[in-house]
Image: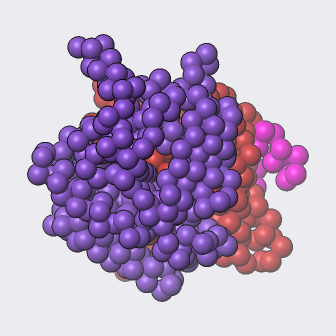
Chain colours: A red, B purple
Amino acid sequence: MNYFIVLTLTGIAAGMIYSALALALVLIWRATRIVNFAQGAMAMTTTYIALAVIRATDNYWLGFVAALLAGLVLGAIAERFLVRWVETGPPLNAVILTLGLFLILEGVVPMIWGAQIQSFPAPFSIAATQVGDTFIALSHFNLFTIGLVLLVMLAMLVFFRFTAIGLQMRASAFAPDIARLLGVRVGRLLSLGWGIASLTGAIAGLLVAPTLLLYPSNMDSILVYGFTAAVLGGLDSPVGALVGGLAIGMALSYIGGYLGGDLESIGALVILIGILMVRPQGIFVHSAERRA
Amino acid sequence: MSQAASASAADAGEPGALEVRSLSVRFGGVVALDGVSLSVPAGAIVGIIGPNGAGKTTLFNVVSGLVDPAGGDVTYNGRRINGIRPHELNRLGISRTLQGLGLWRALTVIENVMIGARRGSSPGFASALLGLPRSDRYEAALKEQALAQLKALGIEEYANRHPGTLPYGVQKWVSLARALISRPALLLLDEPASGLSANEQKQLIALLRSLKERMSIALVEHRLDLVMSLCEHIHVLDFGRLIASGSPTEIQNNKKVTDAYLGSELTDA
């Protein structure tokens, strides 16, 4: 198969994972105007929890569900008991807090599960798919990844557009004080928002581990890619997160394929710096609307 | 969300009574309210007037829990509600509009109104996330309720528009719809007539009179004509103090009131 197409397809599959992490960052940014630098570490933690459950029950899907629930709870706890204290302070406080949470998680997880690299099961084959005589660059697991992330995006869209709680969350993000006057429990919605975001991050963690393996810092580079994707999409737009993730995934795939795999991380940082210099507001944000 | 508070007395549809006793508010060294006592009896339309900076909005802010009083009491239906938190107003049946309207420009008109609905009967987050039928029915009922409220105010044609694209008068009506959808027992209106044309003011007066059966209304205004024709009872604030209370005729003939207004007009000029 044409090398370019192979790179494109693997780029899309990887990009979907960056999209999921970018979406987690975007959800938290929309709700609280905080960039959660602990997002990757939280996803790593929930993936370890999944692994423990999978080993104990010998069932991948139980581990999968455990990771999502752990993500929901971990995010809500982080907001309620940590972030809540710095939300009204200067933005730098929140940055330091999430960085601190990142360091704590990467310190505590190896104390519980060890620091060695572990393999993580995939629910579907990670070998290239064969149709007749030809191999397609995408594995069944890649297809599962793409489908799952698209499903999550769709679920978020429905939740925010068509449910009363989603509506209240959108309203709270724009004007929390007015929402409160109308009876909205803004604090609870913030906890919920962080929970949903880190549930999304947990999905990214589960999708990364089968191919990149599981160790305490396994999400660090993914966080950089996801953050780049989120910034590219404007930090404010779920659709931007999806498109940004795909763009970064493909760009890094081409860089890795044509220039050498060592250059992928550097490539992401170059793209990030480039966006911040040329179009810091991202490509999907209508900044005028935001000032409402 | 818990459903415990949904069966509060306010649900009965009776107008609520508000009373404020020797209320004081300080911002740093500035005294915004100084021992103000006034009441909004059940079923009454009460005007609170005064020149700019007299403390009218501050009074509303204390009642809605946005500002903590330095002293004094706020009671609602005989219950002390000092230190109430803003989100509790909705369950008590108190609605308030804002001077700046405070509509969400990124949301549609009907969405803006839906957020004002009375809390307490909504299904939990889990059913919303899982798309359970109970949740779907709730969304549909909520939407219907919001549409009915828009219809009642004659602005249903704008349901799917964004507030920023509408004339100011219509936006004002939207903010009223958002306050009314919860069927409040007490309605606090902050400068409801500002920015309205003479014709729209007439409509507003007719609307507020028609609401009287179901709710008590307190309105803050500095336009005397509207207050005089609408309110049975008027309280006058000046520099954070209550300088007069009485019927429209009594207020019109009160020397202190005319002085306060003339004084403010001179300094405004």
Residue nearest the viewer, comparing A214 with A25: A25
Q: In which quarter of the image is residue A279?
A: top left
| x 60%, y 57%: residue | B76
Residue nearest the viewer, comparing B115 with A37: B115
| x 49%, y 62%: residue | B42
Task: Please identify the quadrant where the C terminus of chain B is shown.
Answer: top left
User: In the picture provided, is B194 more to the left or to the right than A46?
Assistant: left
Q: Is residue B181 magenta?
A: no
Task: Please identify the quadrant where the N terminus of chain B is shown.
Answer: bottom right
As displayed, is residue B214 above or below residue A98? below
Residue located farthest toward the right when viewing the structure as drawn: A111
How far across and down, in percent of the image, does residue A50 sit?
73, 65
- Camera sees residue B207: yes
| x 80%, y 65%: residue | A52
- Camera sees residue A95: no
Span highlighted in magenta in the image: A104-122
User: In the picture provided, is A107 more to the left or to the right than B57?
Assistant: right
How far across and down, in percent of the image, does residue B173 sit?
25, 56
| x 57%, y 40%: residue | B37
How far across and down, in percent of the image, does residue B167 sit?
15, 48
